[in-house]
Amino acid sequence: MPVLRCSSCGYAYDYREPIWKCNQCGGLLDLEMDSVFTMEMIDRVVPGLWRYHRALPVPLSKAVTFDEGMTPLTAFPVNDRAVYLKHDHLFQTGSYKDRGASVLVSYLQTLGIRRVVEDSSGNAGCAIAAYCAKANITCEIFVPEKTAPAKLSQLKMYGALLRKIPGTREETASAARMAAKGTYYASHSWNAFFFQGTKTFAYEVWEQLGGRAPDVLVLPVGNGTLLLGAYIGFSELLFSGAIPKLPRLIGVQSTACNPLERMFQHPHEEPDSTTWQETIAEGIAIARPVRARQILRALKDSQGSIVSVSDEEVKATLLKLGKMGLCIEPTGAVAMAALDQAVNFSSKRETIIIALTGHGLKAAEKLDQITLR
Ligand SMILES: *Cc1c(COP(=O)(O)O)cnc(C)c1O
Ligand SMILES: [Zn+2]
């Protein structure tokens, strides 16, 4: 049986308890699976990420799914490096957050939970709202007032109860936590089951490379839902002996909001909200990531690193992607904007994966600012 374990005090809970943080100390919970993942466990007749259901905490028969996942991995060779782009903007709601939402909402449905609260800069909210709509669960989504109009339209289409909160992303999060007191907090940053969904990113990359891990994996990082998910997935593959070592994880932040980069360089510093400035990559502008310590541990453990990119670099990258036929939202392109830094961090013939994480149609007005000169 999987166990929910507190990362602060170590207390263990039955994974069917409807809790999102430790009852003893308020700490973050992680899910410990009892299965060891192997190639033979893949259910190849299932098209998307639920092909890995034997390594997920919900049975396939209970999956709330649009057959999402198995996003394309395409070659983009650069300077003697085998670079691949992972097209994680190609999901039902336009971002990789569907990975986490599919597994989390499936789990909530097995518990019989009928109402949830979530907060988001947009994409996580859209993903939770879409899967809740499919599962007929009521959801209340808190977003910062300045959230991109397309994401708000999307949330309304899914029938979410929309709460627009003035101020910073932090203020939105605390409003949601207050509202969650009476219901269930389906938070993508707190909830351990969301990371069970995002870990399938690692399985897919590994399967698509023919049962190999890349040498370097470049991912955007704000709250770390994709980075920690990938770390969990590759750690499971390492533990089962499917791969000999972890890929080096490179987290990419915005220079306008880079608390994790600062903590990586100065390990004794706590994240502080003064690191927050406006950026075109609004989806990763998280001043105080709740899982900061875990993210830093994942970077160190994988012998990886963390870098940041400026808005100017992101804009240039968006135009370059557009000329390749790829319309990506600014936050979804930061890993690509860090390509040169990733190449410098690697050696000849190494394999590098760059994650594209959100569709450009979500941020049309931002793309207009770049193209309408
Ligand atoms: C959520 C999101 C990210 C970053 O995710 P974190 O969990 O904050 O690290 C990156 N790109 C897009 C498009 C996103 O929606
Ligand atoms: Zn605890």
Image (tube, grey):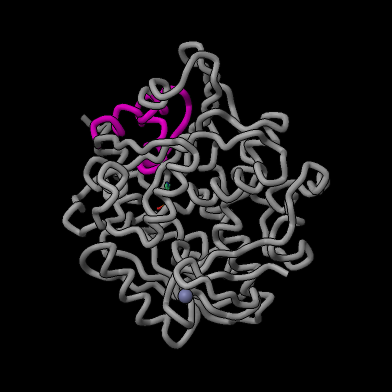
Instruction: From the top left corner, tell me how far across and down residue 158 is, in percent.
Output: 51, 66
Point out the residue furthest to the bottom here: 182
Q: Which residues are magenta?
A: 311-339
In which quadrant is the N terminus drawn? bottom right
Residue lying at the far top of the rendered structure: 80
Q: Residue at x 16, y 56 (%)?
A: 274
Residue at 56%, 61% in the rendered image: 101
Q: Residue at x 60, y 43 (%)?
A: 234
The C terminus - image quarter: top left
Residue in front for this viewpoint, 12 or 139:
12
Foreground residue among 61 and 79: 79
The quadrant where residue 145 appears: bottom left
Q: Is residue 32 above or below residue 301?
A: below
**Residue 316 shown in magenta:** yes
Q: Residue 358: tell me if it is visible.
A: no
In the rendered image, the vertical position of residue 318 relative to residue 261, given as above or below: above
Q: Residue 196: horizontal and vertical position, in percent?
A: 60, 58
Judge whether residue 77 is colored magenta: no
Q: Main secondary structure of the magenta part?
A: helix
Residue occupying the point 51% across, 59% down: 127
